[in-house]
Amino acid sequence: WAPRGVPITSLLAAERRRGRDVPLIHKAAVDLEGAPFRTLVSRRGGWRLARSFASPGPVQFDGPLADEISVCLRLERGEEVPEAAVAPLAAARLAAPPSLPSLLEGDAALAVVAGAV
């Protein structure tokens, strides 16, 4: 897939506040009947005792995880996401850490100066 831009105005809606129409981005409430929330409810008891998580992290445009779809989106598409599917994703992310920008390598590293604000 290719990154695309969305005009911010397409996300806006007018809402009346204090007698004036104000442009706002729609609120997105959690669907308590949706598959992602039902899955959370069914699994959260076990998560208290076991280490199980899926941090989506930043969007990956290149590399081994570029085509990975988040657990939440897979659930909304009606796909089954077994608990064991979470661990390989976390392992893959740890095995492919992001590279350090050249600006921060070697002597070009940034320094914190005491008293500088």
Image (cartoon, rainbow, N blue to C red):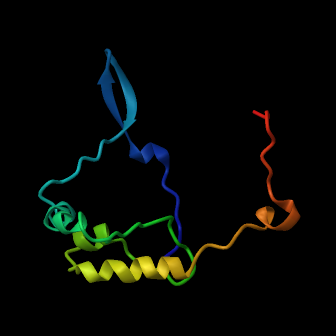
User: Residue 67, how many percent across, how many down?
Assistant: 45, 80
Decide if residue 12 is on the left or right side of residue 63.
left
Residue 66 image position (x, y, % from top left):
50, 78
In this rendering, position of residue 65 left or right of residue 37? right
Question: Residue drawn 51% across and 64% down?
Answer: 58
Residue at x 79% of width, y 54% of height: 110
x, y (%) of residue 23?
Answer: 40, 32
Residue at (39%, 83%) from the top-left corner?
88
Q: Is residue 8 left or right of residue 106?
A: left
Q: Does 16 appear above or below 29?
A: above
Q: Is residue 81 above or below residue 76?
A: below
Q: Can residue 66 be seen by looking at this rendering?
A: no
Q: Residue furthest front?
A: 49
At 19% from the left edge and 60% from the top edge, which residue is drawn? 37
Q: Is residue 51 above or below residue 24?
A: below
The residue positioned farthest toward the right in the image shown: 107
The one of 78 and 56 positioned closer to us in this rendering? 56
Q: Quadrant of residue 69?
A: bottom left
- Which quadrant: the C terminus? top right
Task: Out of 114 and 95, give the one closest to the viewer.
Answer: 114
Residue 64 shows in the view: yes
Q: Using the rendered view, name the quadrant where residue 24 is placed.
A: top left
Q: Is residue 109 left or right of residue 2?
A: right
Relative to the observer, which residue lies in front, 111 or 30?
111
